Amino acid sequence: MLNIVVCIKQVPDTTDVKINPKTNTLIREGVESIMNPFDRYAVEEALRIKEQHEGKITVLTMGPPQAESILREAISMGVDEGVLLSDRAFAGSDTWATSYTLANGIKVLGKFDIILCGKQAADGDTAQVGPGIAVHLNIPQLTYVKKIEKIEDGKVTVERLIEEGYEVIEASLPCLMTVVKEINEPRIPSLKGMMKSKKAEIKKISAADLDVKAEYLGLDGSPTQVVKIFSPPQRQKGEIFEGEVSDIVEKISGVIKGIN
Amino acid sequence: MDYLLTEEQKMMQDLARKIADEKIRPVAKELDETCKFPYEAMKVLADSDLFGVYLPEEYGGFGGGVFELCLVTEELSKACGGIAVCYAASALGTLPILIMGNDEQKKKYLPDLASGKKLAAFAVTEPEAGSDASAIQTTAKKEGDHYLLNGMKHFITNGEVADTYVVIAMTNKAKGARGATAFIVEKGTKGFTFGKKEDKLGIRASATSELVFNDCKVPAENILGKEGMGFIATMRTFDISRPGVAAQALGIAQGALDLTVAYAMQRRQFGKAISSFQGIQFMLADMATEIEAARALVYSTARMIDAKKGNVAGVSAMSKMYASDVAMKVTVDCIQVYGGYGYMKDYPIEKYMRDAKITQIYEGTNQIQRNIIAANLLKESRKK
Ligand SMILES: Cc1cc2nc3c(=O)[nH]c(=O)nc-3n(C[C@H](O)[C@H](O)[C@H](O)COP(=O)(O)OP(=O)(O)OC[C@H]3O[C@@H](n4cnc5c(N)ncnc54)[C@H](O)[C@@H]3O)c2cc1C
């Protein structure tokens, strides 16, 4: 029986995100909010762990009241319980304050064995919150997990994606893992799950329910200062030459001559 | 148009749409080319509970009816007519058990069909018995507590991939149509094998096969209704299944139109998007109107069937005939809007035309539907 917590985030659907060229901020109007795509893999992995080992899965999100919808979505996939950490005091949190708040939310939930997160959020792209939670809870962290090999005798063995390939590492439970999309293919919810999720009660936790220092929360608790956001200059598309080597050589030398 | 769906119906529709977009559309072209059966898509549909939307809760379904079945079928057909029919044909094979089966038969067969663990098929057609179903030559001879089936069926959707077959065979040839009986035959029964698998114009992901019966021993308890009720079972099944074919047609037409509108807005000629030309706009407007009219007819028919109000044979035939004729016309016109590109296999639109054609043929050709509609019309008028 494993207690699994999955931390998920609501993000704008980045497939159609636009940036206001004047203010350099995201245009959020008309953009749909979805579950962070990487978090779906974390939810799916939790469901697979539960199918093999039994356990209870709680999804946790910190966000505004409307973030409840992604908790319900996770429940429709088969998760047992959804918890919303919501409070005005949390507004403006950077990755430090967010991971501090989430870690304290997890403490309130009770005993846990595994915490799963997506490798990063599609809006901020920092990949810092998962590791931050592990630090605040003082537990091992396994990032960029592409496969869970086994969970046995209070230990987990995983394959962790690195640039040259992957490494196999072991950690003792409880631990936190962030997962990459290679780990699985998230399931589509079932009709029974969707009906259940409509009626499911979402547990709500506010700052007052947590054992936290007020000065560590929200904007005040956030050491990060965003100086400037801008769109990077568009990279020019490269050109690929195909065909016989001699033709390619000729084409490339033509291009070089053209530059000169 | 807002058809005032309940929250549950919207949920089923959304789920079917999600599966269509994420799991069906991406594989449609490949399965069309290779004629491979969409086992994975069927598994996703099963895991998501969609096989049970029209079945009673006591058998593991969701307590919906023909309308719910149509909503799901339409969504799946928008992405691929071939994959959608594998789902819809299982319902066609399940409906005779639902409407003619006794308690034991329903308890034995419906739960696995509602969960999608098993697929069903309905086998009426034979080489010499197409539109004229009364010409069936497959026989079933009683021997003690079982029947021996001999003969063959052809053009059977889900043939070989299904586990549960409803087969119409003659128990008394002398009686003609009244001598036909419906049997539930399980795959794996001794003497039941499969012949040719057809190579088709469209719906190529679906399996269409011959069923061969050679002294196939079927227990007497597998008869649906009574001996001699096979033809009635067939007609009653088609009366409620035809809106399902109409829903396929509707989905294919809508799916094709959606692609075509997007294409017309993006394709430029004479310095403008072709959607700015009135010649194109009028085609799009006609297509959209005809599809909406078909949808209104199909949905109303399905709701009438579910409400169990009156004789549905005529309207059921109308819905299948009208929607399939609309689908054929729309998909041909969609290719016209695409121009030469539409004729090429590089673009998805020609497949919609190939997939649409079958809806004018199976579960009774549209000529046969007109016969049914006229027969009902004349019967009603004689009553007056
Ligand atoms: C892909 C595919 C899947 C199928 N799946 C199934 C299945 O799952 N189960 C099953 O039992 N069958 C299935 N069928 C069979 C299908 O229902 C028959 O093909 C259909 O009923 C027509 O029969 P036929 O092909 O013998 O044509 P015919 O009956 O020979 O018809 C030829 C032509 O004559 C016309 N015609 C015939 N009689 C009349 C009349 N009285 N008045 C006017 N016109 C008439 C027809 O409309 C048609 O245009 C399938 C067929 C196909 C192609």
Image (tube, coloured by chain):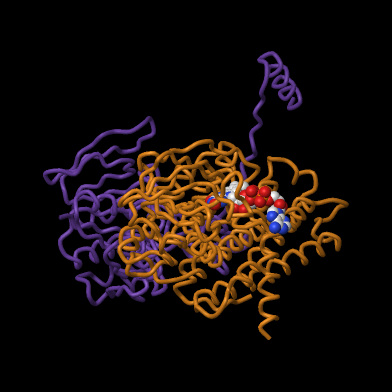
Chain colours: A purple, B orange
Name the side, left or right, on which B348 lies relative to A144.
right
Residue drawn at (29%, 58%) of the image? A6
Which is nearer the eye, B344 or A120?
B344
Residue with the most extreme front position: B174
Q: Quadrant of the C terminus of chain A?
A: top right
Q: Quadrant of the N terminus of chain A?
A: bottom left
Residue drawn at (31%, 60%) of the image? A78
Name the side, left or right, on which B130 lies relative to B231.
right
Above or below, A189 against A91 in this view is above
**Quadrant hosting residue B100:** bottom left
Above or below, B353 against B301 in this view is above
Which is nearer the eye, B8 or A168?
B8
**Quadrant hosting residue A94:** bottom left
Residue with the most extreme top position: A246
Question: Residue A148 at what x, y percent from top left?
Answer: 27, 42
Which is nearer the eye, B157 or A7?
B157
Q: Please say whether residue B355 is visible from this viewpoint.
A: no
Question: Residue B51 at what x, y percent from top left?
Answer: 42, 59
